[in-house]
Amino acid sequence: EHLVLKLSRREGADINYPTLTATIARATLTVEALDYHDEKGEVVTTERRTQLDSTDGHNTYRDVMVTDTKTKAYTHIKVHSIVNNSGISRKVFTKRWAERGM
């Protein structure tokens, strides 16, 4: 069984898509699917997550497919190994670091 959340961008938020739909597995409370919508409400990007792995009490999907619905271009992410609590500073996980890189 799943929960479906329809989410809207907050006024002034720095987010590319005005709305998205998240499909959440009730059993694990993890997001299995995301549909990103354009201004017209049409789905422009999909994200599908499969192969849920629970390591050290942390849920991680080992297979993620992100697809542009118009061009059919996609990014396929496969997680080959998982390390939790590796000691990386929390300061690394900021928007600035994501845009700049390490």
Image: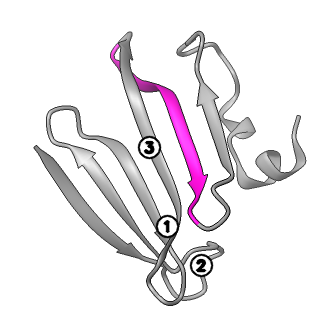
- SS class, disc 1: strand
The foreground one among 88 and 3 is 3
The Cα–Cα distance between marks 1 and 2, rounded to whole angstroms, is: 15 Å
**Residue with the mark numbered 1:** 36
Q: Amino acid at mark 3?
A: Arg
Considering only vertical position in the picture, is 34 above or below 6? above
Q: Residue at x 53, y 15 (%)?
A: 84
* Position above or below: 6 against 85: below
Residue 4 as seen in the image, left or right of residue 32? left
Q: What span is in magenta?
A: 57-69
Mark 2: few, some, or many residues within 10 Å (few <14, many ≥20)?
few
Residue 60 in magenta?
yes
Label 2, secondary structure: give it.
loop
Q: Amino acid at mark 1?
A: Tyr
Q: Position of residue 35 (x, y in %)?
A: 43, 62
The quarter of the rendered structure image containing the C terminus is top right
| Closer to the camera in the image, 90 or 22 | 22
| First along the sequence among labels 1 and 2 | 2
Q: Main secondary structure of the magenta part?
A: strand
Residue labelled with disc 2: 13
Q: Amino acid at mark 2?
A: Ala
| 20 left or right of 87 in image | left
Secondary structure beneath disc 3? strand
| Dot label at residue 56 | none
Residue that mark 3 sits on:
48
